[in-house]
Amino acid sequence: MTLSSSSFPPVRAVGRGAAWYRGDCHVHSVHSDGELDPAELAVRARAAGLDFMATTEHNSPAAPGSWGHLAADDFLIVLGEEVTTKTGHWLALGIEPGQVVDWNHQVRDASVGRYVEQVHRVGGLCVAAHPHAPYPSGDFMFPFGDFDVVEVWNGAWTSDRPWNADNEAALAEWGRGLAAGVRTGSWRAAMGNSDTHLEGQIGIPHTVVFAEELGTEAILAGIRSGRSWIAGSADVDLLFTAEAGGRVAGVGERLATRGGRVDVKVAVSGVPSGSVSFHTDRGKAHRASLPGGTRGEVRWGTRAEDSSFVRVEIRHPDGHAAALSNPIVLT
């Protein structure tokens, strides 16, 4: 059967121009092991406040003709695949229509780089998925070095809770690698996705990314560069900046401090009575409480000689994550 180009979603939506966009890049439908069909997923993604989503069926592209008609001027659908191997799962995002990435490889083959390169050749992004998932083949045994991004927050499909011990372990592992990666200029961004299989899961969590437009190339570029943060839901909002000598940088950017003091500011909404912690290459550097209202702001000061980067974690009163950021790099 020959498919028309309209069978697949367009690579660009109208969107809002250069802006922050919310999206979920790990979603399963009835075409693999999910319980919702593509139309139901698209409706629920939009209701969850998302601007984009990625189709990531296990070891296959999206079913022919299932997604093209669901895209809209204000809603982008990115083609992808969850490459489900015996020694870990990874997301191939931004693949071409009908492209299938072979899943028949494992860490002992030392061949995963070949398959990652296939995705890179078409402009795609490769994500180490749920590195510490508590089920057979869920543990990610491949080196992170072969991948562009690490999924540090995976949704609740194996639990009734949106934040679990496997997420805590993934966040800690990524955080340790971040300290070395920033020093060498090769750090990998973090992202979060729902791994939706069931009703009520999409968008919990999701990634909020700054992109030049609502298009596949721009969205993936923003995720790759770390110009993004992870939200537990669309109820949570975050503004994270650092300033030195009148120069300001946001998440995923570099700030030239010129040896001066750095003022870090975090404005949070949707996490009443929660907490903010600031993390650097020295570990957790500062923690402060948020007020009981809908919005709060926390400030902290440092210098580049003490902190090569700053990232933040926003937690609910019970300790579960509400939002996580990629770093601002201080030079």
Image: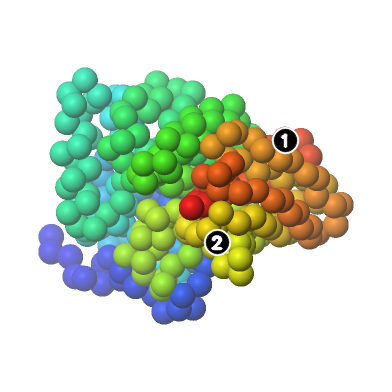
Q: Residue at x 17, y 31 (%)?
A: 111
Mark nearest the camera among 1 and 2 is 2
Q: Nearer the viewer, residue 150 or 93?
A: 150
Q: Is residue 314 visible?
A: yes
Name which quarter of the figure residue 108 lies in: top left
Q: Residue at x 60, y 52 (%)?
A: 231
- Drawn side of residue 29 relative to residue 112, left or right: right
Q: Residues within 10 Å of mark 2 (few under 14, many from 20)?
A: many
The x, y position of residue 234, in whole percent, is 63, 58
Q: Residue furthest right?
A: 292
The x, y position of residue 38, in whole percent, is 41, 57
What's the residue type where badge 2 is placed?
Gly
Q: Is residue 41 visible?
A: no
Q: Which residue is mark 2?
A: 250
Q: Residue at x 65, y 44 (%)?
A: 278
Q: Which residue is mark 1?
A: 319
Q: CA distance from mark 1 to mark 2?
A: 25 Å
Q: Nearer the viewer, residue 60 or 296?
A: 296
